[in-house]
Amino acid sequence: MSSAPVSSPAPTAPASPGTSPYQGGPDIIAIPGPSPVPARVLNAAHRASPDIYGAPLAQVNLQVMAQLKRLAGTRAHLASYIGNGHAGWEAASANMFDRGDQALVLTSGHFGRSWAEMTEGLGVGVERLDFGNLPPDPARLAERLARDPEGRIRAVMVCQTDTASATLADIPAIRAAMGDHPALLVVDAIASLGCAPMRMDDWGVDVLIAASQKGLMCPPGTVFVWFSDKAAARGATGLTSPWWDWHGRAGSDALWRFWGGTPPVQQVFALSEALSMILDEEGLEAVWSRHARLARATWAAVDAWSACGGGVRLSVADPAARA
């Protein structure tokens, strides 16, 4: 008997810049706040597009919209857009503000400052309360709003988690600090929704912004803006183009209207799978608990390294203020 020849192993491709040939584990989305995309979610997206005018896809889309409201803890209106987190910022601003309106942005890191700059670029007057790389102080907010008896500030804007500084804003405390001031409370939950508690209605949040690529465990490409009746009552402004208009997207009776045109079909299927995993299989509070448990383990490791003289420490000293 003759044996088959033994072939040489195929040459290994060189590692791409910035990677290690010994790196283990699955690939992740290497963006701020690297996020794993489960194989189930990728597989759900890996399918041909059905008829975008057919009833089956429209039904999946409606289910996704209902799941997203459950995720945010709200019965508020929901507008969906094809885009990233920056698109969510602009979508919210285009519906809340007119040129010359005033906004107060609480900044605790790079993303809060970037949000303020983008809003300013639309012609909105932006005042910043900067807290360095620490969470916003509700007392400072209350003091500032007390000096606005005429209610010229139309919105208070804050990141629940600023990825760059690893801070966690206390949203209920910020809402309480606003008192009876008529400004909208606008929260960027792009890095926190699905990871940290969010109860939009119970906490009095008027506008909430999130995207698919973080706690929702999906590839980037879709963004969501939930808005209250109070926010909806503003109506169209000089910044509200047909594309950004959230009224035409929220509660639509046609699939294409939800997305301003052709829907992102593969994203819809990915979101359906991911949200089912979060809400129906593991359970949202269990997801929050898991994130908190993993965070505490990470903090304990860093504290141990610091105690050994490694020169490593967490950027936020107060555990309650850490993302």
Image (cartoon, grey):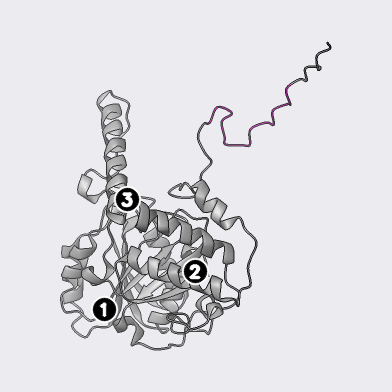
Q: Residue at x 34, y 53 (%)?
A: 195
Q: Which residue is mark 2?
A: 60
The residue stretch that appears in magenta: 9-23
Q: Quadrant of residue 108?
A: bottom left
**Residues at discs 3 and 2 in contact (Cβ within 8 Å):** no
Q: Position of residue 23 (x, y in %)?
A: 53, 31
Q: Is residue 192 visible?
A: no
Q: Residue furthest top?
A: 1
Q: Which residue is mark 3?
A: 287
Q: Position of residue 201 (x, y in %)?
A: 25, 71
Membership of 254 in magenta stretch: no
Q: Which residue is mark 1?
A: 183
Q: Residue at x 35, y 84 (%)?
A: 232
Residue 125, compared with residue 291, is above or below; it is below
The main secondary structure of the magenta stretch is loop
Look at the numbered disc 3 and give the secondary structure of its residue: helix
Look at the numbered disc 2 and give the secondary structure of its residue: helix
Residue 220, compared with residue 19, is above or below; it is below
